[in-house]
Amino acid sequence: NAGVTQTPKFQVLKTGQSMTLQCAQDMNHEYMSWYRQDPGMGLRLIHYSVGAGITDQGEVPNGYNVSRSTTEDFPLRLLSAAPSQTSVYFCASSASGVNTGELFFGEGSRLTVL
Amino acid sequence: KQEVTQIPAALSVPEGENLVLNCSFTDSAIYNLQWFRQDPGKGLTSLLLIQSSQREQTSGRLNASLDKSSGRSTLYIAASQPGDSATYLCAPEPDRQAGTALIFGKGTTLSVSS
């Protein structure tokens, strides 16, 4: 029962470096999304996708890119890392392409930008 | 813009107490509402999903109610146990055809002592 798998679990970057957070789900879910969680700020939506080839911006998209070439994968790219992007990142998926239904989360990726 | 408030922010109770966690939201035009649990250092787990046409949903010792017109949902936990200690988050979802997704409250951190 893999569910939603995120890699890496931990990452340290220097300011200006780029990297990709990977997210894969094996439940054939249409909807996938990326959130960041910061103390005192709660969970904030970065980008989401309602199906392969379709992505849209969430509340805090600046500095992040996404693509959805397959149903299973939804990588999140940091183009030029900044200390403000230090956070815990969560990927989530659900079966419905229109409205969410039950949302399944990965275990998170903890990113530190120095 | 949907705003979600959860009260209290933190709660400490002895084992066996019945308790109520509150969630209020500003935009009552929601499709559904989910309650999640998050353990420290972990991802979120969906506990209950209430469709907009429903008034409540039950799972074991958990009961969640929804009053769309007043913008409120409550999570009732019966006979609390130390294993219930976690952060509980609510997330109303607007109709995604409007181009938005789940918005999370900041959560209520529950500590149940034995």
Image (spheres, coloured by chain):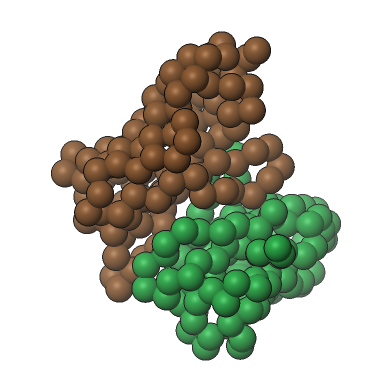
Residue A60 vs residue B48, the one in the foreground: B48
Q: Is residue A73 above or below residue A58?
A: below
> Which residue is drawn at the image coordinates 35% and 43% (left, top)?
B57
- Does B40 sit above or below residue A53? above
Residue sitting nearer the eye, B100 or A112? B100
Q: Measured from the top left, where is residue B71 in percent x and y?
A: 24, 42
Q: Is residue B93 visible?
A: yes
Question: What quarter of the picture does the C terminus of chain B occupy?
Answer: top right
The residue depicted at 74 percent of the width and 53 percent of the height is A110
Residue B71 seen in the current view = no
Percent x, y for residue A79? 69, 74
**Residue at the image point whose x is 64% and y is 28% from the top:** B83
Tell me how many marks there are: 0
Kindly indicate the quadrant of the structure image that contains residue A12.
bottom right
Q: Position of residue B88 (x, y in %)?
A: 51, 36
The color chain A is rendered in = green
Q: Position of residue A82 (x, y in %)?
A: 70, 60
Displayed quadrant of residue A109: bottom right
Seen at 24% across and 43% down, the residue is B55
Instruction: Chain B: give its colour.
Output: brown
- Residue at the limit of the structure toward the left, as seen here: B69
Q: Is residue B56 above or below residue B16?
A: below
Vertical position of residue B92 compared to residue B77: above or below: below
Quadrant for the N terminus of chain B, please: bottom left
